[in-house]
Image (spheres, coloured by chain):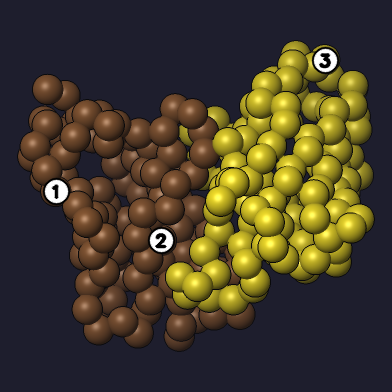
Amino acid sequence: AQKITQTQPGMFVQEKEAVTLDCTYDTSDPSYGLFWYKQPSSGEMIFLIYQGSYDQQNATEGRYSLNFQKARKSANLVISASQLGDSAMYFCAMRGRDTDKLIFGTGTRLQVFP
Amino acid sequence: EAGVAQSPRYKIIEKRQSVAFWCNPISGHATLYWYQQILGQGPKLLIQFQNNGVVDDSQLPKDRFSAERLKGVDSTLKIQPAKLEDSAVYLCASSLIRGTGTDYEQYFGPGTRLTVT
């Protein structure tokens, strides 16, 4: 069975600083995808970044980067130069090889202060 | 490009009543998903459609929940009768086609927040 674990219920970061949100996963699939979504108070899930299990390089999307350590089964999200608008819930999710169902973690609430 | 539309945004009902949610996916998206997000948890897939056929409904409580996508476009999710534990946000998502990788990204709607009293 697939499982996502996010151990940080809440994180605080000062504006313009970098922050790392932790995510570990468990799967027996040899091929899988890892995702990070942002959920602001408005409720919709906004896709941030994707990492494939066979990708050799860590994914980057603007201020977002994914620190992928396959042997440790971790896929941490790094947000550089935090902005006040980054305050939201952040969810790590995974998808196995033979399914497009997303399995989500419990999320981390990030609060950015001036 | 218009995003995934959902209505209503909020709904309050009493237990044992029925309720229906509507979702209109992004134009051209063949795959549609309904997720349930209970407070403090991540979303959990309830049902997945490919066009108008069901791909996965293994976590749908079929004694009270039903969903349809008759013409392969918009979809309705119904709960009858509702229980207190059904209080949650119901998220609809769509993707162009099935599969893995970023080509098959799921796009989410704003959700419907259901409160059962």
The type of residue carrying mark 3 is Glu
Say whether mark 2 and mark 3 are on the same chain. no
A3 vs A55, nearest the viewer: A55
Residues B1 and B75: in front is B1
The mark lying in front, picked from 3 and 2, is: 2
Residue at numbered disc 2: A35
Does residue B13 appear to the left or right of A10 in the view shown? right
The Cα–Cα distance between marks 2 and 1, rounded to whole angstroms, is 18 Å
Residue indicated by mark 3: B14
Q: Is residue B57 left or right of residue A14?
A: right
SS at mark 1? loop
Colour of chain B in the rendered structure image: yellow
Tell which tag, 2 or 1, sits nearer the viewer: 1
User: Residue sitting at 45 percent across and 85 percent down?
Assistant: A30
Number of the front mark, 1 or 3: 1
- Kindly give the residue lying farthest to the left in the view shown: A17
Percent from the top left, x then y, of residue A99? 62, 73
Q: Is residue A61 among the parts visible in the rendering?
A: yes
Chain rendered brown: A
Mark 2 residue type:
Phe
> Of the numbered discs in the image, which one, if any, rests on residue A80?
1
